[in-house]
Amino acid sequence: MSIQTTTHLNFDGQARAALDFYAAAFGGAVSATTYGQMGASDDPAWSDRIVFGQVSTADGFRVMAFDVWPGQPYEQGTDAFYVFVHGDDSVEITRYWDGLSDGAEVRQPLAPSAWAPLAGQLRDRFGVVWVLDVAPAEDAAPAGNAAPAE
């Protein structure tokens, strides 16, 4: 079993610019998938927004970012980030989910998704937003590489 956490920054239309900025600051490469590439929104205004993005370097730096889902409230400072927990064992991720769920607001139930065998999002009783997912079997890369067809 392995598990890693990654800082995930949330934006409302600025994710691509932020990822490019962080890549320039830290080095490394940007990996990004748009809502249009994933088929996640029929709204043309969302086609170029980032549904999954990250900057990673050979020496271990990693930050993830996306543009919040259409219709999802966004207030910078309130919804600016979440903790992303990515693992390769469904039992382990479910155990963490169950532990965090006590008193939480479930924003996306832990269930199969387009990009992972299990994925879910909740705001814990302390106000911290957590996203947990299980790597697809073919995903042998470290945390943060779990979006569809990267």
Image (cartoon, rainbow, N blue to C red):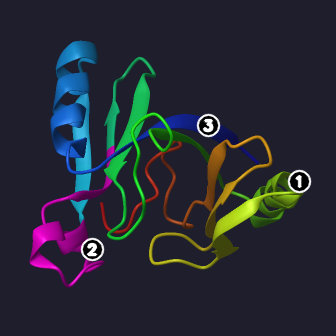
Q: Position of residue 64 (x, y in %)?
A: 40, 40
Q: Is disc 2 placed on a helix, strand or loop?
A: helix
- Magenta run includes residue 48: yes
* Disc number for residue 5: 3
Quadrant position of residue 25: top left
- Of tags 2 and 1, the one toward the viewer is 1
Which segment did they paint magenta? 35-53
Q: Is residue 4 left or right of residue 75?
A: right
Q: Image quarter for residue 91?
A: bottom right
Residue 38 lies in the magenta stretch: yes
Residue name at image x 46 percent, y 57 percent: 146
- Circle nearer the N terminus (1, 3): 3
Left/right of residue 7 with respect to residue 15 in the rendered view: right
- Residue at which label 2 appears: 38
Which amino acid lies under the numbered mark 3 shown in the image of this protein? Thr
Residue 136 in the image, given as x and y percentages of width and height: 54, 67
Nearer mark to the viewer, of 1 and 3: 1
Residue 97 drawn above or below residue 58: below
Q: In the image, is residue 91 above or below residue 127? A: below
The C terminus, quarter of image: bottom left
Report, in whole angstroms, how far the alpha carbon at label 2 lies from the one at label 3: 24 Å
Secondary structure at badge 1 equals: helix
- Counting from the top left corner in percent of width and height, residue 60 is at 45, 22
- Between 42 and 37, the one lying in front of the other is 42
What's the residue type where badge 1 is placed?
Answer: Gly
Q: Are marks 2 and 1 in contact (CB under 8 Å)?
A: no
Instruction: Identify the residue at horizontal 18%, vertical 43% (top origin).
Output: 16
Q: Residue at x 77, y 40 (%)?
A: 126
Lateral position of residue 110 relative to residue 112, left or right:
right
Three-letter code, disc 2:
Met
